[in-house]
Amino acid sequence: MGLRGPSRGEESQTATMPRRFVSPSRVRAVLLVLGVLVLATSCGWSLWDSPMTTVRPRSDFGRWIDDIFMLISWTTLVIFVAVEGGLLYCCWRFRDRPGAPPPRQIHGHTPLEISWTVAFAVVLLILGIPTIRIIFKTQEAPAATDLRVDVAGHQWWWEFKYPGLNVTTANEVHLPVGQTVAFHLQAPDVIHSFWIPALGGKRDVVPHRVNRLIMTPEAPGEYYGQCAEYCGTSHANMRFRAIVHPKGEFEQWVKAQQAPPVESTDALAQQGKDTFGKSACVGCHTIAGVSAGVIGPNLTHFASRRTFAGSLMQTTRENVIKWIENPDHMKPGALMPNLGMTGDKSKALAAYLLSLK
Amino acid sequence: MPGTQAAKTQGVLWSWLTTVDHKRIGILYGSSAFIFFLIGGIEAIIMRLQLARPDNTLVSAQTFNELFTMHGTTMIFLAVMPFSASFFNYMLPLLIGARDVAFPRLNALSYWIFLSGALFINASWLFGVAPDGGWFGYANLSSTQFSPTHSIDFWMLGLQILGISSMLAGFNFIVTIINMRAPGMTLMRMPLFVWMSFVTQFLLVLAFPAITVALILLMFDRFFGTLFYAPSAGGDPLLWQHLFWIFGHPEVYILILPAMGIVSEVLPTFARKPLFGAPFVIFSGIMIGFFGFGVWSHHMFSVGMGPVADSAFSIATMLIAVPTGVKILNWIGTLWGGSIRFRSPLLFSLGFIAMFTMGGLSGIMHASPPVDLQQTDTYFVVAHFHYVLFGGSIFGLFSGIYYWWPKINGRLLDERLGKWHFWLMLIGFNMTFFPQHFLGLIGMPRRIYTYAPDLGWHFWNMVSTIGSLIIALSFVVFIVNVVKTMRSGTPAGPDPWDGRTLEWSIPSPPPVYNFAIEPTVHDRDEFWLQKNGDGHGGKPASRPRAATPQDIAAIHMPAPSYWPLVLALAVAVMVSGLLVSTYQIIVGGLLTLFCMYRFAMEHHRPAAGHEY
């Protein structure tokens, strides 16, 4: 790093100056803080890194937004420094001094007023023109070649359907890298907002409307998403993941999803299937060949998903049992009722669900 | 004067309950606002404590949702608006050289209706059904299907009651400012606080009908089974958003313009110079008020209005930054060449300029719809509007509190504690809200009661929580200051700051009739002119002659009345009947009609001993 403290020579030079504005101890303190920051960044602690960061865009849509955000940020930074600097300068330069004459009673300066009004208007014009260009660019009609994904925002989980591929999944949307995808957003209950920060901006999911969000993911990876419009008790628990696959891998995933559910030979799993088929589970959940409920998530390939229940938890045996035994405890207000499945029943159900690869 | 005699004989409490004196009503508004400000602050602290760590379990999801709903509702409608109203009440008549507002009893009615609405909303806590739909109460989450308890009812009906209060006050002050100015005070000679308040009153009377309509439709949906916002029946939840924000955006300017007015009074006093470019500041305020009605859909860029609407509202929003920027530069121009005394009122005003500038600049970012798609409903926006409403409105209002406190109470607030309050508040404020910009940019949505530990959000959330505790500490210092100086503070005298406007020409606290002799006005800075001349070699303006006892005896002041209080109670009985029984609605309605009749007829014939 090019960040170095003043050498000994410089420091002693400062010390011999007749009038010091900054004491060496203060210089050392500032350098210490900077040093800690540099160290922290080099250790991998970065302000901008998060699975939900908006400032490391991984799609064309995200990049366009970031470009204009950066343009506005730098412009406003210049204005910020000028205004706050001017304010501080005035406070220092025109502070009350004992015995000073009363200030001249100036009422204003019209040419100055007109020029800064015009200056502001010009700056905003500079920001407005690219803004409008990007507005239109990001709201074009989808092309026939786009991969269509129908998104339904439910209280409080996400459903993803691929109409062309006959695949339905929940809380985990899979996308191929470099392929333009058109999300068609619908809400069966209240307003939600569909947002994968690393892949670009959000779009509200409004009942009885179909909103669209079009983007091309540019890098493989697992990106976090979350509902961004307040939608009731468990709004905070309405999360999901977007998994962008490298070329070829997406097709494998689609094939696996299209296959019928795996029949497990495990006795406990068989018992779980039995329990599932005989209980109220079938009223809400679909498992291909077993049940056809549509209120809750499709569980046909439940075990292929990394997380479940609004992407709240990792798909592990303990978590699945805890969830079945008391959904409301994990996700307050959850619409899945507590069916009194405890002990052997919840263990068997968990075994069955985890067999659904 | 029977009014003052009644006050003496019937006790202090009764005199406050029946007061129609604009100064007393101003104090009532101010003290109520401060109590609600503390309640809203406690709600905020609990939220900050919950968010300090990931997966925290201090409060439940439901409680957290109630807290942010009530924090927003309280701070906007029960703290900042009545704080502003307390200054409208107390200061406007003094600044325009009047003895009271145009309709003193209506003024009292505004306050009592405000108080009953505020208590009504907060009563929901006692019934365990605090509103939980957000201060914006979006349809169709607010429908009986998705919010079956009375929580939304308390919120909706409470806001309706508060709306009546705001409308009444708005009309009252418009008439007051137009009709009651002292001779010689042309519109362009009005002090800036009067001007900004004047614009605010028009926003109040034009914006509140929109939310009233929205709330009436919601009331019909919830109580009578209509389907205005029900998408399944062809209703449209976005109708609510449009109606709400065409109120909601002007509301932002209702919250900020009075603070801008205060700053425009404080800066000239402490820089000892007239406001730089006053006509431009005035017209900027008018333009902000005007454009304020044309930008509401910038709250809705993510709902999918289409590129044309997005572009139009984006340009309109950027346009509103022009008059705002002009104001900021004029305030700095006021300091330029001045002789600045750094007393606590000025510090808060400087804090206003510095912080509001930051809020304005981050506002330009999400005026651009593509950028807004990343920032809306995240902590970036939370940071932005707290820079505007806390860094702006609250700093401005506290500037006003420190500035006019000696006028209102006759004693100065302690300067050393005032400075402690300012610096703690400034540091705490920036520590709380600046990191929220980062949180928003790394993806933290608003209104979430919890978050996972693997998102990298915990560090800045912890910083933010510590900052909020520093803000709380700063208000402890303020309360100590108030308690300490209430009895033992330095007596202020009529003109402690070497003021420029008329309120400093009369005693502190002012007598009940304000001005013994009606002043004649020659300049915006009339009192400065009386003291020093115009600064261009002109002679000081003539001061009003000294008042004689006969002058004082001839002053006619309005008599106190209990009808405003009783009428407000009747309205509260009627409205709360919607949650109890139809009979209560009918009884309350009849009572309201009766009280309105008595209110209207009270002075129809001369009261005993009262002359016309």
Image: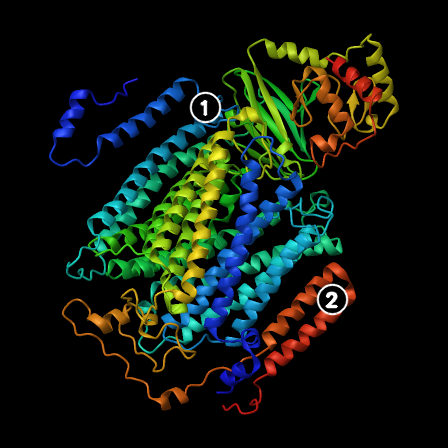
Residue A181, quarter of picture? top right
Q: Is residue A47 left or right of residue B531?
A: right
Report the residue marked by disc 1. Answer: A56
Closer to us: B550 or A134: B550
Disc 2 on helix, strand or loop? helix
* Location of residue A273 in the rendering, given as x and y in whole percent from the top left corner: 84, 17
On what subunit does the disc labeled 1 rest?
A
Q: Residues within 10 Å of mark 1 (few under 14, many from 20)?
A: many
**Total residue callouts:** 2
Q: Residue at x 22, y 30 (%)?
A: A24
Task: Say above or below: B96 vs A54.
Answer: below
Q: Is residue A149 left or right of residue A15?
A: right
Instruction: Please check whether the numbered discs 1 and 2 fall on a single chain.
Output: no
Closer to us: A305 or B501: B501
Q: Is residue B303 left or right of residue B89?
A: right
* Location of residue A236 in the rendering, given as x and y in whole percent from the top left corner: 62, 34
Amino acid under disc 1: Arg
Report the residue marked by disc 2. Answer: B585
Closer to us: B186 or B510: B510
Residue B138 in view in this figure = no
* Location of residue B86 in the rendering, given as x and y in whole percent from the top left corner: 47, 64
Task: Say above or below: B510 vs B136.
Answer: below
On what subunit does the disc labeled 2 rest?
B
Amino acid under disc 2: Ile
Disc 1 on helix, strand or loop? loop
Residue B266 in view in this figure = yes
* Location of residue B519 in the rendering, given as x and y in whole percent from the top left corner: 32, 78
